[in-house]
Amino acid sequence: MNAAKIKVQEFLSRLPLFNEMTADELDRIAAGTTERRAERGEVLFRRGDPCVGFHCVIYGQVKLAFTSSQGDEKVVEIIGPGHSFGEALMFMEKPYIVTAQTLADSLLLHVSNAAVFGELEHDPKFARKMLAGLSRRLHGLMGDVEAYSLRSGVERVIGYLLKGDPQDDGDTLTLQANKAVIASRLNLTPEHFSRVLHMLAAKQLIGISGKIITILDVEKLRNYEE
């Protein structure tokens, strides 16, 4: 067994989808898995490209986005380490409906549909884990629809800041991308996103230092009313 394959197995075993697999099961998945290193800003695939598997992020970040005919971008999701994307289209055997581009230097694994379909036949537990992952993705997208439809811009930004569940005053979070990307993810303009951040800072609810956001008053931020 070569060193490259052992490394792929080690990466796979750290991912939630594969962390309960036996060595033999990991062997089978690894046989259908390829490693991809991508520099920041690299396009992994474009809308309309065929989907013949799904990706897992080992490190780095990937944005999934639509681009309008006018060139405007709408970020659908930001994928970080330990998460995967593309499973639903793989099962549907449909082409990609979004473009995927790295936001940082990244290492990804591409698991072929043949490897997945073969493992589904061997292990019902693997099927349940895949279904659970797809269900979480659907639940998150439904939450996004609710937020965009019913919540104000301020509420969306506060929800984003509280997503990491800060417990104490002084807890920090790092913005996972530049403000334009995060604003698009929240269905806001970059200017609106910045205005909300500076308003919250002026009220001494948060502190801003570059990409580092310090939560100065967790309770007031959670219970903030416009």
Image: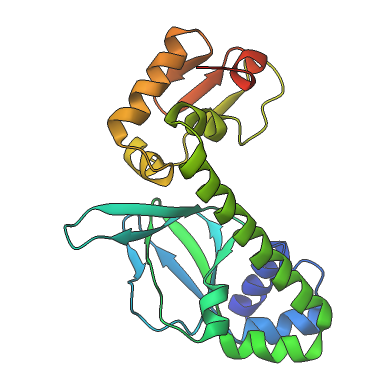
Residue 105's x, y, as percent?
Answer: 41, 54
On the picture, is 223 further left or further right than 201? right
Q: Is residue 114 above or below residue 144?
A: below
Can residue 61 be seen in the rendering of this structure? Answer: no
**Relative horizontal placement of residue 189, taking residue 155 as reference (left or right):** left
- Camera-side residue: 23 or 94? 94
Residue at the extreme front of the image, as rendered = 150
Q: Residue at image x 73%, y 86%?
A: 120
Picture coordinates of residue 183, whole percent (x, y):
37, 39
Q: Is residue 116 visible?
A: yes
The number of discs equals 0
Residue 179 % position (x, y): 36, 36
* Image position of 190 with respect to 59: above or below: above
Q: Residue furthest left?
A: 70
Between 157 and 111, which is closer to the camera in this rendering?
A: 157
Residue at x-position 58% and y-position 12%: 216
Locate the N terminus and report the quarter of the image it occupies.
Answer: bottom right
